[in-house]
Amino acid sequence: MVKKVLLLFFVVIFLSGCGIKFDQQSFKPEQKVITFWTLQMGDFAPYMKEVISSYETKHPDIKIKWIDVPFSEGEKRTLAAVMTDFPPDLINLNPDFSALLAQKGTLWEIPSDKLNSFTPEIVNAMKYNGKLYSIPWYATSAVTIYNKELFNKSGVKNLPKTYQELADISAQIKTKTGAYSYLPTITENDTMLKILNKYGVSEIKDMNSPESKAVFEMFKTLYQRDLIPPETITLTHREALEQYMAGKIVFYQGGANFLTMIKENAPKVYAQTDVTEQLKGPVGQNDFSVMNFVIPLRAKYKPEALEFCLYLTNSENQLKLAKLTNVIVTDKEALKDSFYNDYSTLENKARSISAKQLNKITPALRQKPDQKEINLIINQTVQSVLLNKNSVENLLNKLSMFVL
């Protein structure tokens, strides 16, 4: 008895230390209380509460306890929680961290037949070792944002559709406009891996391949010839956006949401801005990002949590969220909605292009449990290549020894 009391005491102290506040609402003894964590969704509290209330009305035996966690603390709190006997029943995460938890054996396997309403390419991309441990929620897929005035000034007739086509016109763009063609943030997170994936490198074991070497050589040539900014070696996508808003680069790849930032901070540049599809490689697929839900293996109400999650992510509720946030739905029917076939404004055009790109996302990059460490090593290799510290072949040989 003493041990149980002490255990309960430490759990309460742990959750209090994490800054999580319990809802003061009392629950009926006969109700099952589903604890549900989201990441940084506080700004959309009315929507979340509406969905929760609707679900509870239809399921009087269920009570949903919603807790919104700051994005920066999501992984730390989740890792601590899933190792206890009292984890949340449903947690909002990203696929990389979900794969890490799956590798650790802390997640409940999701029955694949429960996700037939979702885009199959996304579902397959989220599998870990052939098994499914997460449910997709919403997605994003970058578009190419470009300065029409600078592009027309360059004298180039056709918009580039691939990385190689953009590389081929970079010299002409700089000569005619004084601006760089673009600033590829290839040392940020998994950017380089996403580009390599478009060249058929979807497995880490293929890093040392002719296709991979060609990509590294392409960026090395651009950097050494001063056809991409020196800052390429360190800057992030937010800093690249600042370069675009300052008129220093012609093309910028990012989410449709960045158009709002351009409109607010650089209205003259926004007036000259248009969008087109994201750059591709020989394989022809698009990259994307997705947020998902997982159910801890030690969760008390796993089937009930899955049922609520499928309600939250059904076609109707996904569309409601998309119209509030401009994200892309992952439900097959919702993707066909007229909301994603509207080109009346620049923002609507970007959103529609982004949604259609989800129809071609395979083969998707296969994540590893230690993906963050792999990304770091790859990005260090990218820096060495751009700075010409060694031949691309030697650097890729060294890289393969670390990541395999």
Image (spheres, rainbow, N blue to C red):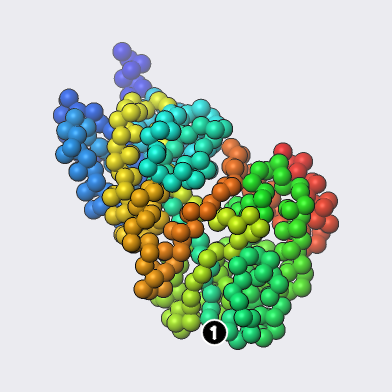
Local secondary structure at mark 1: helix
Name the residue at 48% across, 45% down: 122
Residue assigned mark 1: 149
The answer to whether residue 302 is left or right of residue 272 is left
Give the x, y percent position of residue 359. Answer: 48, 53
Name the residue at 55% across, 69% down: 252
Q: Residues within 10 Å of mark 1 (few under 14, many from 20)?
A: some
Give the x, y percent position of residue 96. Answer: 53, 43
Name the residue at 23% across, 28% down: 32
Quarter occupied by the C terminus: top right
Residue 127 vertical position relative to residue 284 in the rendered view, above or below: above
Name the residue at 29% across, 49% down: 317
Residue 162 vertical position relative to residue 210 in the rendered view, above or below: below
In-front residue for pair 180/143: 143
In-front residue for pair 233/128: 128
Give the x, y percent position of residue 121. Answer: 49, 45
